[in-house]
């Protein structure tokens, strides 16, 4: 079964410093990986996805993620953190059962990112 | 271009009651998925609807049921509510495709509280 793991419940970073939010995955076949962000009392917003191609994926709000097949990781990164980046971040994998186009998303447990001024 | 809209935003029910939550997908989307997000956890997949049929289901009891209408909007129904059903219920829409590489777009959710 497909799964993702986010080993850190919380990440604290000073504004202006680089940030990394970790994610590892376990899939059979090719992984379809996503990062979403959730602000308080809001739904999830799509940040970026990896389907195939370049291992470094660029997304919204200056975020990027690095796909590493040998380490089965898909870490989210940003070169310079902003206070407004403080939110809950979810790594996710799309579960594609067999030949069906039905494809639910399986989410990690989330990492709370806190950026201090 | 309106995104995914959900109603109501908040709802309070008591144990044993029934509830209906509603979702309108993003314009041009034909597939609707429902997720339950308990406090402090990641969203859990409930089920997905396409062409007015339930296409895939997560590990939720039959008390959870749904419907999709010809205009692609959807309802989530929960019967015999339990305290543990208290959660944020998220609706997500997407465009059906065989490659499965289209991101799902989420609404802001319905916060359901069971007393």
Image (cartoon, rainbow, N blue to C red):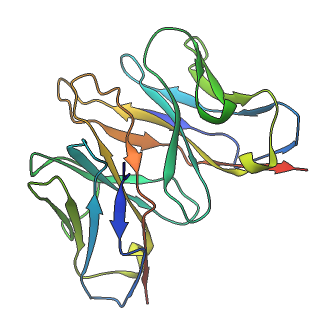
Residue A1 in view of the camera: no
From this viewpoint, which residue is outermost toward the front?
B1
Q: Quadrant of residue A81?
A: top right
Task: Point out the image quarter for the N terminus of chain A.
Answer: top left
Q: Please state if B82 lies on the left or on the right of A82 as rendered.
A: left
Which of the two residues, B10 or B62, is positioned nearer the viewer here?
B10
The quarter of the displayed image where residue A58 is located:
top right
Q: Position of residue A69 (x, y in %)?
A: 55, 13
> In the displayed structure, would residue A12 be above or below residue A16?
below
B112 horizontally vs B61: left or right? right
User: In the figure, is residue B17 to the left or right of B107?
Assistant: left
The residue that appears at 64% across and 25% down in the rendered structure is A64
Please name the residue shown 88% across and 33% down the image: A17
Question: In the rendering, at what x and y percent does residue B96 appear?
Answer: 22, 34
The vertical placement of B106 against B62, above or below, is: above
Residue at image position (42%, 74%) is: B9
Relative placement, left or right, of A73 versus A62 is: left
Q: Position of residue B101 (x, y in %)?
A: 35, 26
Location of residue B110 in the rendering, given as x and y in whole percent from the top left corner: 41, 70
């Amino acid at each position: 079964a497909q799964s993702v793991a986010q080993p850190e419940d919380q990440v604290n970073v000073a504004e202006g410093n680089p940030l990394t939010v970790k994610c590892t995955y376990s899939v059979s076949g090719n992984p379809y990986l996503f990062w979403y962000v959730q602000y308080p009392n809001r739904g999830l917003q799509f940040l970026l996805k990896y389907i195939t191609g370049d291992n470094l994926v660029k997304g919204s709000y200056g975020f990027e993620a690095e796909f590493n097949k040998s380490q089965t990781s898909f870490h989210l990164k940003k070169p310079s953190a902003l206070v407004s980046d403080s939110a809950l971040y979810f790594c996710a994998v799309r579960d594609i059962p067999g030949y069906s186009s039905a494809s639910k998303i399986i989410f990690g447990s989330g990492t709370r990112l806190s950026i201090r001024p | 271009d309106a995104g995914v809209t959900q109603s109501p935003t908040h709802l309070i029910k008591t144990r044993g009651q029934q509830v209906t939550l509603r979702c309108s997908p993003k314009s041009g989307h034909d597939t609707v998925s429902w997720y339950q997000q308990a406090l402090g956890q990641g969203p859990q997949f409930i089920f997905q609807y396409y062409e007015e049929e339930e296409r895939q289901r997560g590990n939720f009891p039959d008390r959870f049921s749904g419907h999709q209408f010809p205009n692609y909007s959807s309802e989530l129904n929960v019967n015999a509510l339990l305290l543990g059903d208290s959660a944020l219920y998220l609706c997500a829409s997407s465009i059906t495709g065989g490659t499965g590489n289209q991101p799902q777009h989420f609404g802001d959710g319905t916060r359901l509280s069971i007393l």
